[in-house]
Amino acid sequence: MNNNPGKEVRWLRLSVLVNILLCLVVLFLVFILTRNQRFEEIDVERINIVEKDGSTRMVISNKERSPGPIQRGQPFGYPGGTRAGMIFYNDEGTENGGLIFSGEKRNGKVTAVGSLTFDQYEKDQTIALQYVDDSGKRRTGLTITDYPTTMSGMEIDEKRKALEEMPDGPEKTKAQDEIRQYSPKFRMYIGRGRNGSSLLELADAKGKSRLRLVVDMSGAARIEFLDENGQVTFSLPDSAKEN
């Protein structure tokens, strides 16, 4: 029988403290040894690159685990699971572009995409280096696009969803006209056109094409000047003189 219960309690406390310290030392050593590991090969479905505060800066994932659009940490628009690749995020947790890719042949028809994009602030892609193949209609090039700065992508998405719930009529028509002003404005394209020609196309601030430099599939080159309705007003070589 123990005649000194106080001493037994003190030893018990000391034993518990020693065990806790040993566990902390082991965890610390595990952390030190594993924080800079080197792997020859790793299989993973998704990797989140984060800052020290936990905010996401980049996601690398397969198609199924890919995120949908995010603005300031809040999902909106279409759901995730649609795009394999890398998605970038700015300092505020808003999607800022990405590198995505896909490709398959079904029933003899090819559908393929390779896309590196950078987004305008709180909007969609303003710079896009892309390859697109839609059943043989191929386009490969660099596109520059402008967006109005008065409304974010999330706000536009909310307005479009509200528009879908409105009944047909004058109010819906008016709302449709208002939301069109927030549509992207094409500014420049350089690359391969869908018809196989080499193409440089420049547009005005309204997104209307005003100048084209073309080398077609036969090797013939021309320069075209267009009006605001997309009609060629002058070309070189001058087609009028050729006729």
Image (spheres, rainbow, N blue to C red):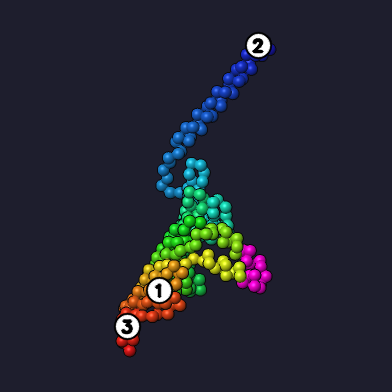
Which of pointers 2 and 1 lies earlier in the amino acid sequence?
Answer: 2
Left or right placement of residue 3 versus residue 220 in this view: right
Magenta stretch, main secondary structure class? helix
Label 3 Cα crowd, 10 Å radius (few <14 / some 14-19 / many 20+): few
The residue singled out by tag 3 in the image is 238
Q: Determine the CA span between mark 1 and mark 3.
A: 17 Å
Q: Secondary structure at mark 1?
A: strand
**Residue 226: % across, % down:** 40, 77
The residue singled out by tag 1 in the image is 210
For residue 104, above or below residue 24: below
For residue 1, above or below residue 13: above
Left or right placement of residue 23 versus residue 169 in this view: left
Q: Depth-wise, is mark 2 or mark 1 nearer the camera?
A: 1
Disc sitting over residue 153 in the figure: none
Q: Determine the CA span between mark 2 and mark 1.
A: 98 Å
Q: Residue at x 50, y 59 (%)?
A: 149
**Residue 213: % across, % down:** 35, 74
Residue farthest to the bottom, as pictured: 243
Amino acid under disc 1? Arg
Amino acid under disc 2? Asn
Which segment is the magenta one? 161-173
Mark 2 and mark 3 in contact (Cβ < 8 Å)? Answer: no
**Residue 134: % across, % down:** 47, 72
Q: Quadrant of the N terminus?
A: top right
Left or right placement of residue 235 versus residue 43 in this view: left
Which of 155/70 is in front? 155
Q: Secondary structure at mark 3?
A: loop
Is residue 9 rendered magenta in the image?
no
The residue singled out by tag 2 in the image is 4
Q: Residue at x 50, y 55 (%)?
A: 95
